[in-house]
Image (cartoon, rainbow, N blue to C red):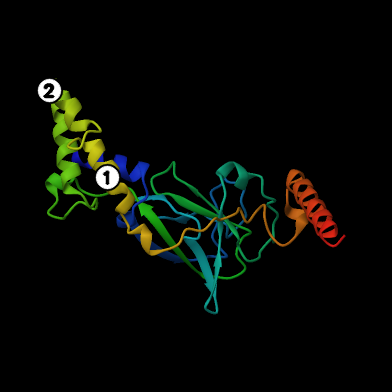
Amino acid sequence: MFNAILEELAQTYDFDAQEKFTTFNFNTALTPPATSPVQVGSGPYTMPTDFLRAEFGDVFWTLLGVPYPMIALDPMEFDMTVQQAGLQSYPYWYTVVLGQTNPGMYVYPPPSGNYPVYVRYRASSQAVAAPETNAGVPWFPSSTYLYTRLAGELMKIADDARWQAYLGEGPEGAQGILRRILPQIDNPETRAKTVKLDRRRFGSQFSILPSTKVVGWLVFLCFSLDGIMRAFQ
């Protein structure tokens, strides 16, 4: 039960305490499964069994000390990439297939060299021993929440009427405790928040923007120029 609570937290929220790090090298000779349409070198590169997800900027490879971030794609988007024999370059897209024993990462285009890859990821709790059988400390930073939540879940199973108070949003309930500690976890006030645009859709070239975005920019520029001309009249 304890591990189920931790896994729910891991699936629902992103905590720095979940972070792990793994690294591997591209393999230009890596042969994909017979059922996969990707070309040699694209994957799958085996991820750790506890791999859950990676955030924006957490997956990159390096060449001569220069980092090159890769952008995550949905598997459906990745399936629509052009796959031709002999295609090799610097990878800029990746996807991770989770529905297997070990998650597998695929990259596009296939790498032109065996460059080192670095992956920071959020770890699942399913691959570790349950806290009640493990001498280690659970990764979640609030023991009060865990004990209150566990007690409430056991009361619910035992048909104890107090379970609603223990699991509720009151000041002593598990949900109330979680609501108070979430804004402070990982010390978010120490760094500024930035807006990130999809690098597949936004950039220095207007040609990569969807048509609706191009029209919007043109309208904005027309109004801006009109305002400047009126100011000098």
Real-space Cα separation, disc 1 to disc 2, in angstroms: 28 Å
Residue nearest the viewer, comparing 68 with 141: 141
Amino acid at dot 1: Arg
Residue 200 placement (x, y as % from top left):
65, 54
In the displayed structure, does residue 208 sit left or right of residue 149?
Answer: right
Question: Residue drawn 50% across and 56% down?
Answer: 56
Question: Residue drawn 18% across and 28% down?
Answer: 165
Disc 2, SS: loop
The residue furthest bottom is: 64
Residue 30 placement (x, y as % from top left):
54, 60
The residue furthest front is: 233
Residue nearest the viewer, comparing 131 with 37: 131
Residue 189 placement (x, y as % from top left):
37, 60
The quarter of the picture where the C terminus appears is bottom right
> Can the viewer see residue 201 in this picture?
yes
Residue 174 placement (x, y as % from top left):
21, 37
Q: Which mark is residue 197?
A: none
Task: Kindly indicate whether the residue at mark 2 contacts the one at mark 1 (C-beta within 8 angstroms).
Answer: no
In the displayed structure, does residue 138 sit left or right of residue 98?
Answer: left
- Mark 2 highlights which residue? 158
Question: Residue drawn 75% across and 47% down?
Answer: 216
